[in-house]
Image (tube, rainbow, N blue to C red):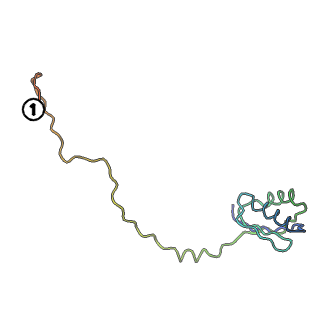
């Protein structure tokens, strides 16, 4: 979904009800921000407006859904200009399996009783 700006009018009398309205709105999954303006609450985020209204009606009482508008991002052009290509990071090559430069010769003897000499020191 797209981020939306949802404006609703609530019946808020004291600070406890204001705090309860903000906690309820912010508690929903997908809400980015919520602000209070007099008796209105403005919620920005990727949230269903009907679900938000229903939850607030359960907690607060009377709620009017005034407007739902798509939130426009103005910084897209600025972000593209500011983005720089990342510099390559120099790293050492990964260590794979070690391959010996010389292989051990395999000696095949015809004589079954041939025994390689043991330790020369003894």
Q: Disc 1 designates what residue?
A: 122
- Dot 1 surroundings within 10 Å: few (below 14), some, or many (20 or more)? few
User: Residue at horizontal 90%, vertical 67%?
Assistant: 11
Write down the quadrant of residue 104 in the picture. top left
* Percent coordinates x, y for residue 5 in the rendering: 75, 68
Residue 50 at x, y percent in the picture: 81, 59
Q: Nearer the viewer, residue 5 or 104?
A: 104
Residue at 40% x, 67% y: name it.
Answer: 88
Q: Is residue 35 left or right of residue 118?
A: right
Tell me which corner region of the image, top left, top right, bottom left or bottom right, holds residue 40.
Answer: bottom right
- Residue 100 percent location from the top left of the image: 22, 46
Q: Which quadrant of the figure contains the C terminus?
A: top left
Q: Taking 37 as reference, is 16 above or below it?
A: above
Q: Give the side of residue 8 with respect to residue 73, left or right.
A: right
Q: Quadrant of the N terminus?
A: bottom right
Kindly identify the residue that appears in the image at 11 percent across and 28 percent down.
109
Which type of secondary structure does the marked residue at label 1 adopt? loop
43 lies left or right of 91: right
Q: Is residue 6 left or right of residue 82?
A: right
The furthest residue to the top? 113
Q: Give the number of callouts.
A: 1
Q: Which residue sits at x=85%, y=65%?
A: 16
Residue 81 is situated, as x and y percent measured from the top left of the image, at 53, 77
């Amino acid at each position: 979904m797209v981020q939306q700006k949802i404006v609703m009018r609530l019946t808020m009398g004291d600070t406890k009800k204001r705090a309860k309205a903000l906690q309820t709105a912010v508690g929903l999954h997908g809400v980015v921000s919520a602000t209070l303006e007099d008796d209105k609450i403005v919620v920005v985020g990727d949230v269903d407006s009907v679900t938000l209204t229903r939850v607030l009606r359960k907690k607060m009482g009377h709620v009017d859904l005034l407007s739902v508008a798509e939130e426009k991002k103005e910084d897209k052009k600025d972000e593209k200009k500011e983005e720089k290509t990342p510099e390559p990071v120099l790293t050492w090559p990964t260590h794979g399996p070690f391959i010996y430069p010389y292989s051990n010769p395999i000696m095949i003897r015809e004589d079954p009783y041939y025994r390689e000499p043991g330790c020369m020191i003894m």
